[in-house]
Each structure stands twice: as structure tokens, then as C-alpha cells.
Amino acid sequence: QVQLVQSGAELKKSGASVKVSCKASGYTFTDYYIHWVRQAPGQGLEWMGWLNPDSGSTNYGQIFQGRVIMTRDTSINTAYMELTGLRSDDTALYYCTRGPRLSPSWGDLWGQGTLVTVSS
Amino acid sequence: QSALTQPASVSGSPGQSITLSCTGTSTDVGRFNLVSWFQQHPGKAPRLIIYEVTKRPSGVSNRFSGSKSANTASLTISGLQAEDEADYYCCSYGGSTTFVVLGGGTKLTVL
């Protein structure tokens, strides 16, 4: 079954870091980029960046540069998104999704989302 | 503030056709044929319904169609159904530096 399965909800304090995982199955992990998108409560989608699981290269959205780190472990077909220096406005549902490696298009498969709550 | 401009809300009656707009600039929507549309029902993950302006992923109803003129992309839903009530987001490739630009979303209400 082709799917992306994310780790569970997280509750963090301001200033802490959070690391969310996204496990791929049913397809060749290295054939697709992993993109991360977040959605604050009642708000729209916000693209965070992509990871190339084959090379490990990344491209981060401008507002996240310096605070986000995307990595992967190809031995277990899992991508990770770590966000540092958490603030209350980082409270959101974080999604992983994929895009073909040879195309800028993305979003044909999504994880279930991981709720990250940041408290002061 | 979103990079692509979408109307906050639109509404239509069952059976009607409705068009959602998505306005960008000459550096994103106008430059690349890489506009996507996502549908999101409450409490659910987004679902890709249009990519590369006009293409539909397997399993997406042909009632959904996409187009583009200059800096504005459009999503047309024909034969509106109650299940089409959802939020719709447009997205464009913005080049190797910006990469992704997103719209703020349109809430579609089926009356």
C-alpha cells in the first residue's frame, strides 16, 4: 500500500525543538522528493521545503531558513523534519507529502499530519 | 500574506458550474505551466486535484478542470455536488529560488 505515515502529536515548550518523522511505504523512497507543509489552526497551507531522499539535498522556504532541518534515513525509508526555536505561532498541523524527483509538481500523496503544539 | 491571490469564499448551487481564480505574477503563474490545485475537507489532509495547470491525477472526477490565462489560473467545477464543499488551494512553481508559492485558499460552499 502506497502511503506516508507520520509520527504522533507533540507538545513542546517555547524555545524547544521538535522532530517529526514520515515513513514511506509502497514505492521507491528515493524516486520522490519529500515536501513538508504546515497548517496553523484555521489557516491556510504553508510550504516549508523539500528533501531529496536520494542525495539528501534540501531546499527550504525563506521564512524557515535557519530554523528547519530536513533529513532522511534511507535504510528505513523515513524522512524527518526538525524545527528549532519553537514559538507559539509554530503550533500547527505538519504534513509530509511527495513529489516526483524530476518534476517541480508535488502533493499526490500525503501523510496523515502531525499536530505540534507549542506552549509557553 | 499569501503570494497567490484567491477569493476567500465562493458559493454555488448543486448542478451549477463554478470557477475559482488564482492570481499570481509573471514570475510564477504567468511564467510556468506548473499550477496545482488542492481540495481539503475539514479535518482531512489536502488532496491533489489538478497539476501542471490542466492535468488530473488518476481517480479525480472529470468535473474538475484547470486552465490558465496570463497570470491567473482557474479551477472550474462543473455539476456542483454537495461533496465539493471544501477549501481549495492553488499553488505554483516559483522558480529555483522561491520554488513554491501558495494561495490563501477559497472556501467553497454548496448551497
Image (cartoon, coloured by chain):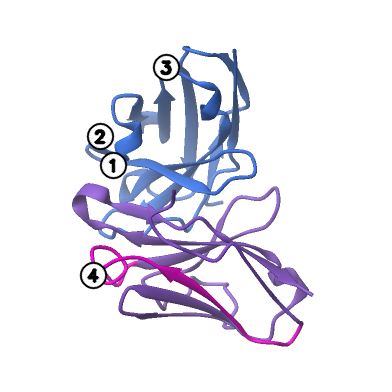
Chain colours: A blue, B purple
Contact (Cβ within 8 Å) of mark 3 with mark 1: no
Name which residue lies at 32% across and 45% down. A30
For disc 1, the marked residue is A52
Chain under numbered label 2:
A
For disc 3, the marked residue is A85
The CA distance from mark 2 to mark 3 is 23 Å
Q: Nearer the viewer, mark 3 or mark 1?
A: 3
**Which percent across, then down, holds residue A92?**
57, 34
In the image, is A30 to the left or to the right of A79? Answer: left
- Give the residues drawn in magenta, as a range: B14-34
- Disc marking residue B80: none
- Between A12 and A101, the one lying in front of the other is A12
Q: Mark 3 belongs to which amino acid?
A: Gly
Q: Dot 4, how many residues are within 10 Å of its Cα: few (below 14), some (14-19), or many (20+)?
A: some
Name which residue lies at 41% across and 19% down. A84
Q: In which quarter of the view is residue B73 placed?
A: bottom left
For disc 2, the marked residue is A56
Contact (Cβ within 8 Å) of mark 2 with mark 3: no
Q: Nearer the viewer, mark 4 or mark 1?
A: 4
The CA distance from mark 4 to mark 2 is 28 Å
Q: Nearer the viewer, mark 4 or mark 2?
A: 4
Q: Main secondary structure of the magenta part?
A: loop
Residues beneath discs 4 and 3 located on the same chain: no
Upstream in the sequence, badge 2 or badge 3?
Answer: 2
